[in-house]
Image (tube, helix red, strand yellow):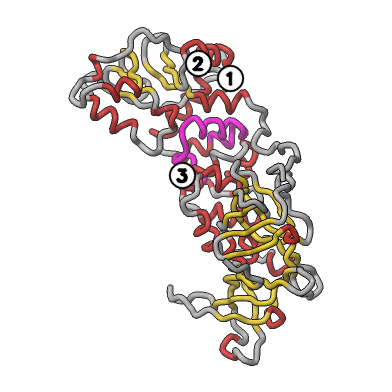
Amino acid sequence: MAAVNRVYAARLAGLVVLGPDGESIGRVRDVVISISIVRQQPRVLGLVVELLTRRRIFVPILRVTAIEPGSVTLATGSVSLRRFAQRPGEVLVLGQVLETRVKVVDPDLPELSGIDVVVVDLGIEQTRTRDWMVTRVAVRPQRRLGRRSNIHVVDWQNVHGLTPSGLAMPDQGVASLLEQFEGQRPVEVAEALRELPAKRRYELFRAFDDERLADVLQELPEDEQAEVLQQLNTERAADVLEAMDPDDAADLLGTLTPADAEVLLGRMDPEDSEDVRRLLSHSPDTAGGLMTSEPVVLAPDTTVAEALARVRDPDLTPALASLAFVARPPTATPTGHYLGCVHLQRLLREPPATLVSGIVDVDLPTLGPQDSLAAVTRYFAAYNLVCGPVVDAESHLVGAVSVDDVLDHLLPDDWRERDEPELPVTGS
């Protein structure tokens, strides 16, 4: 397929990036251009490429040997694995430029004179010197009464407002970014947000619904979670905390001052805040502080078919879905008398009408709320588990600890931000 030397930047998003031998390296996530204070034609500097490991790196545009409709090919398979970090003067097309308000002064388009339009794409073109430059700007009048306006393509020199100060204007739209994030996992969205300037991050945080924001926050370092929470008004912050897993909400509130945490707990729904308060009463380095208060709990008369339906819940992590706990009512934590657990593999081997009371494992030892982090790790290693029950002195199930909770506490606080060594992607 023939390579092209003229393309729109937004259409590069998601394209596969190939090495010279056709090996897949990752996917394009953004285009980096230079925009200066003085009015100069913007130059394309390179691509932000997401590797298969989800790390986002910078690939200089001069490393690109071909852009085709379905892929981007590099001249070499050796690229720096250093995490992309935006430098002064660098601008992300998808992350910062799209939906910027600009003015168009073009005698051929008098209908755009004096009105606000927004950028919907940038046309880039390769010159004879192999440099790529921004040559066209696709714009659309701001929507009115919910109607989509026509898109116009104008020469870059007829567009005014594509400047650092123009990009810093508040209340920039985020519809294009939200569309880009559709279908992506929260951890992938969190990784992408960390590469954006603070202004764009907070515009996105405000645009996410409570559930989406809660999911993404849980994948950010705790100091960044607290920073985002403090940018929200109290009611919105309480709503987001309610949407978070109770253990993650407790970890986040634990980083705030007691007074600030109490204000937010007071605005939360009492049923949600009760779980979080109970978790906050335990030291963070104990089973009680690590556990979630919402594991899969079944009554003894639950059938295998019903149990399997419960563990199919897409909101459950694989670790929590691996083990269902059986207790006398009530089945909300703290439960009635704890009877034992049923492993997922056992559920898959039994007839659908079988009652879980007949296949419950009563021999697996339990964890206590005060057990240390070291005791929890030994427990998982000894019994080859990824999830374990936490039972109090009165034999009530109060929660469950999963291996991901343990890893979060064993890894350094900055594990999400650490760079890998700078190595080639391939041996080419």
Q: Tag 1 or tag 3, which sits nearer the N-term? A: 3
Q: Tag 1 or tag 2, which sits nearer the N-term? A: 1
Q: Residue at x 64, y 51 (%)?
A: 21
Position of 29 with respect to 342 (left or right) is right
Separation (CA) of disc 2 from disc 1? 16 Å
Residue 145 colored magenta? no
| Mark 1 burial class by Cα count in 10 Å: few <14, some 14-19, many 20+ | some
* Badge 2 element: helix
- Vertically, is 190 above or below 86? above
Separation (CA) of disc 2 from disc 3? 34 Å
Give the magenta-colored segment's residue range. Answer: 235-262
Q: Residue at x 71, y 42 (%)?
A: 427
- Three-letter amino acid code at disc 2? Phe
Q: Name the residue under label 3.
A: 239
Of residues 248 and 44, the one nearer the viewer is: 44
- Vertically, is 89 above or below 393? below
Q: Which mark is residue 380?
A: 2
